[in-house]
Amino acid sequence: MRLLALDTAGATGSVALAQSDADGSLALLNSAFLPGREFSMRLIPAIAEMLQENHLALADLDAFAVVNGPGSFTGLRVGLSAVKGMAEALDKPVLALSRLAVMAAAAVECAPDARQVYSVLDAGRGEFYLGIYRHAGWECISESLETAATLRAALAGVSSNDGCIIAEKSAATALAELQGAAVVESTLEPMLALAARCWREERFADVATLDANYLRRSDAELFAHAHTHQLVPALG
């Protein structure tokens, strides 16, 4: 199985081309990192170059994987639009991966015996995304958007004996309580590990209904809501 995986949910992005080994795991053939704010310009050329270097065409791929959030509004739209377009044109399956689940999958390396994994991402504006998982990101207990105060409360009872907190660097920097957390610099390998398991267990997304997982409303929706709220007194 040949897979093209995209992650455009964060400040930087990545594209990976992988092929399954005899044991069902995915071996990386090629990868590229994309600078933030340039996803729309760099993504398609990066894919084309990667395929050319490996003497492959899009039709040679068996599936696509995409991180569908939570994360950057614009980045998610770019990645999802690209994957959905390619998958629909080629009639190939899509594996949709939560960014928080990918973080939890990274805990296999640093805390393989953890009963639960708490994934923390910086959501900006003093807020954080929190995902609580079992089985290395496979079983989702909950995903939520938290303030610094509610996140502290959620993590207060986490014991190193049965839980593991894993965070991206910016989240650990923003919240002092996360300084003891395992910090993940790259999610490329856990993304492929999670995608391989999704493929083996045929956990495919419905391309027609696949959408971004924001865990909160977009800026446009927030603005529209605020504008409507301001108009209500005038209408009365």
Image (spheres, rainbow, N blue to C red):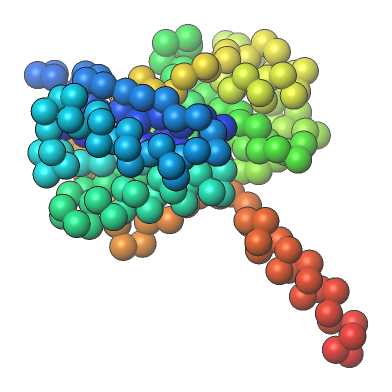
Q: Name the quadrant containing residue 49.
A: top left
Image coordinates of residue 12 in percent, x first then y, are: 51, 30
Q: How many marks?
A: 0
Q: Is residue 169 left or right of residue 62?
A: right
Image coordinates of residue 226 in percent, x first then y, are: 78, 67
From the viewer's side, name the closer residue of 123 and 101: 123
Q: Is residue 176 visible?
A: yes
Image quadrant holding the C terminus, namely bottom right
Which residue is found at the position 74% from the left and 24% from the top? 174
Image coordinates of residue 43 in percent, x first then y, are: 38, 39
Which residue is found at the position 50% from the left and 29% from the top? 35
* 30, above or below 204, in the image: above
From the viewer's side, name the closer residue of 100 and 18: 18
* 19, above or below 110, in the image: below
From the viewer's side, name the closer residue of 58 and 103: 58
Image quadrant holding the N terminus, namely top left
Q: Is residue 136 visible?
A: no
From the viewer's side, name the closer residue of 70 and 77: 77
* 200, above or below 73, in the image: above
* 152, above or below 145, in the image: above
